[in-house]
Amino acid sequence: MTTTRMKSVCRMCHGGCGAVVELVDGVPTGIHGDPDNPTSEGYFCIKGKASLDLLRSPDRLTTPLVRTGPRGSGAFEPVGWDTALDRIADRLAAAIGRHGPESVVLGQGTDRNYQEWVFRLANALGTPNVVGPAHVCFYPRVMASIMTYGGFTFCDYEGDPEVVLLWGSNKPSTHSDGVIGVKLLRAVERGSRVVTVDPRRTQIASRSALHLAIRPGTDCALALGMIRIVIDEGWYDRDFVAAHTSGFDELAEHVRAYDLERVARITGLAPGLIHDATRCYALAARACIEAGTGLSQNENSFDTHRAIALLAALCGNIDAPGGDLIWEPMPIEGRRAFPRSDLLPEEQARKRIGGDKHKILSMAGWVAPGDLHEAIVTGSPYPVTSMVVFGSNILASHENTGLVREAIGKLDLLVVCDLFMTPTARYADVVLPTSSWLERDQIVEFNSYIAARQRIATVDGCRSDEEIILELAARLGLSRHFFPSLEAALDAKLAGIDLTWEQFTKIGYIRNEKRYRKYRDGGFATRSGRVDLMNNGLRALGYEPFPSYRAQPEADPDLPYIMTSAHSRRFYNTEFHQLPTTSRGQTAARVTVHPDTAEREGLTDGDEVDLYSRTGARGVRMTVRISDSVAPNVVMADAGWWYPHESSVDEQLRSSVNLVTTNDRSDVHMGSATMRGFAVGIRRRGPGRG
């Protein structure tokens, strides 16, 4: 018996923690955090610990399937890989021949380090339509940062910030690309103070110097109010503003409308608390802002992130030690170059669905789901007939489930590449079984490092998304834009640092060294070379040059509560509900309500309720949890829920919050849906199950 250990990088969420896999005679038997990994320092969460569950799950798909019954019925027959891929390629080619390449949509979920592959296939095909969660996830912050100072930023925790403004982010429990919550906690151990803006009293909020329990969906007003305080009090970095920004006087005039008393009324926060939080952040010698996806899921999405970007710039915290560092990518063919945007003709790019309406999202290459599904249903601006989805359960993850269901029901071809038979896969014409992160070779590219993720195990019958894309490209006559093998593609990606994939696997990890105040070498990567406090580029696109808060609708007495949502730390978006390790501690979706709310509605812990956003409409079913961690007028629902072992799609999705989200109020720049911060009512279903 031979025991070995292999190091890798986990991808059970976005974090990218270092992992050590233990093998006996080549078979994985254990997994834990890598204490030598400089990013995660040995940290490993429950999702990472469930990696072997995922590898061995008896529910895994292991053969391609072709639908034999009505959509959603779950009736399929197994076929071989060649048969499945030939069928997909033939039908895609036929659709392109009839309606043009724009009739084909590629979809994906959260990036598993193959996002650039999906975009490369779309660009090679000639379709401008790639759909995903970008509009409610990372891209509002990315695009707001790029439109303000020419690049996106990450917190320099290792630079020992005096203050961390944790805004709409529960960083110790939810991790973003290469930015692990442990880095924040280490900074706190060294003396960093945390100011948390979050409707919920999370664990980190309880430990914070200040907690601003904001009314959900009003963060933009708070950011603009803080900017006014900084200017009025003279707390901004005068030297930085004078030398490196443009539009200061105009911004000062714009934020006059956001006086402290008005902002307090909008946000539900005490004026003194807003002033104290602003002072704490603005007067710190080193400070950073960790802005999370909680800010991206409402109609003020882009302007909220842009207002925060302006606040950081005014206080001189951009590209400064302990501040918000602008990402400087390593010279590999990665997120920027590999998609080959040059392959997409300009006339095709102009056909991007919703591109005339949500122009900033379109600039990033994405389509908003609401725009896409409306186009499929109406046939306008042109027929959309085919969709190939990589790793996304769109019936649970996209807003407005009813519209999504109607749209995918009208497609001529739906292909789903996934590990499990999800509700979305049940609607597919062809289902392709994919591999987990332990079963694939990938280059991991984050802001602070690149690393090798090596294939450690194999599940017979499964293939990686990259391998599927290579096979489809070959069948569609696009091989000239791709590679003869996955290893050849990895070699090409690494050519800029003079390494082959084989050589890189022996190195394993290369740190991306930080450089501070890069703007001193030639300004910011904007047209003006400065931080654009007033953005004339936005004005040229038909938008306002400054961020503004769009007020929420008048209160409806039948909908007395404001719903927000959060993902359980045990799951990742809609994933892992069928794994023993992650599902053991929670088997049903919960809604957290304040004790006063429970008394008003006659609720006890464990009761079942429906949350509804339209009187008399279908609701989303939740189990009550009573806690004073939320305000009396706020309810917090678990997001991303579905029940894998239910027999019907309706029952599988009964606790999916997107049953009550709509496209009625979306961000004008990004198409971000209002998935948090909208009015709901509570309807008791009956005695609880405990």
Image (cartoon, rainbow, N blue to C red):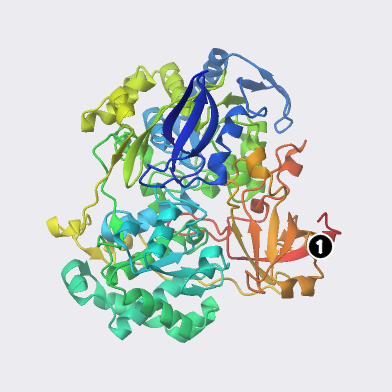
Name the amino acid type tagged 1. Arg
Helix, strand or loop under label 1: strand
Task: Examine the image and state in which quarter residue 148 appears.
Answer: bottom left
Q: Is residue 336 above or below residue 196?
A: above
- Residue 510 at x, y percent in the picture: 29, 38
User: Is 519 left, or right, of 37 in this rendering?
Assistant: left
Residue at 62% x, 25% y: name it: 61
On the question of residue 639 being in view, the answer is yes
The count of marks equals 1
Reading the image, the residue beneath label 1 is 684
Return the residue found at the far right: 687
User: Is 627 left, or right, of 489 in this rendering?
Assistant: right
Residue at 14% x, 60% y: name it: 520
Location of the C terminus (image quadrant): bottom right
Classify mark 1: residues with Cα within 10 Å, few (<14), some (14-19) or many (20+).
some
Q: Is residue 445 above or below residue 623?
A: above
On the question of residue 358 being in view, the answer is no
Depth check: 290 or 251 in front?
290
- Residue 386 at x, y percent in the picture: 54, 31
